[in-house]
Amino acid sequence: MWFQKTLILPPKNRGFHLITTDIEAALPQLKQLEVGLLHLLLQHTSASISINENADPTVRQDFESFFNRTVKENEPWYRHDYEGPDDMPAHIKSSLLGTSLTLPVSQGRLALGTWQGIYLGEHRDQGGQRRIMATVYGERSGTD
């Protein structure tokens, strides 16, 4: 089975947001798979998608603090500043963290580790809606 869908996430504040349940809710087709893969492509250059700690929200706050200290705004060498001081740093953060994931699907569920969740890194002060192209591939379970 192959399936593809564009997911639209509503605007989020700057920071790191768990979107695992949003992804799962938008893709009920995952429940049909015995084994497969889910590929996610975030179709933006100023946000990111990654996997990390899903239980303690302070991890997401620490991520935001780290990246803001590591990739600062208003650096004098930035030439790309047409959309404001958060624009070029957002592109750098997006490149460091990435914009795609490939995840295993097992027995109708994402096969994430116990403490793993999918993060959307919103690196703009006002990023707007975010689009994710989801491509699902796998073998259906025999119980369909």
Image (cartoon, rainbow, N blue to C red):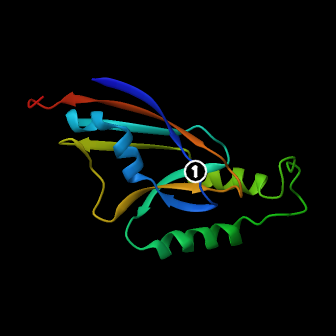
In the image, residue 70 above or below residue 9: below
Looking at numbered disc 1 in the image, what kind of residue is underneath it? Ser
Image quadrant holding the C terminus, namely top left
Pinpoint residue 89: horizontal percent, then vertical percent: 74, 57
**Circle 1 sits on which residue?**
48
Mark 1 lies on a secondary structure that is: strand
Pinpoint residue 51: horizontal percent, then vertical percent: 43, 56
Pinpoint residue 143: horizontal percent, then vertical percent: 8, 32
Give the number of callouts: 1
In the image, residue 2 above or below residue 27: above
Residue depicted at 70% across the width and 72% down the height = 69
Question: For residue 44, which quarter of the picture?
Answer: top right
Query: In the displayed image of the protein, which residue is found farthest to the left?
Result: 143
Residue depicted at 84% across the width and 54% down the height = 84
Pinpoint residue 121: horizontal percent, then vertical percent: 57, 56
Looking at the image, residue 124 sits to the left or right of residue 75; the answer is left
Question: For residue 67, which quarter of the picture?
Answer: bottom right
Front residue of this view, candidates 37 and 27: 27
In the image, residue 144 above or below residue 121: above
Looking at the image, residue 112 sits to the left or right of residue 118; the answer is left
Looking at the image, residue 133 sits to the left or right of residue 31; the answer is right
Front residue of this view, candidates 75 and 1: 1
Image quadrant holding the N terminus, namely top left
Residue depicted at 71% across the width and 50% down the height = 91
Residue depicted at 64% across the width and 61% down the height = 14
Front residue of this view, candidates 14 and 39: 14
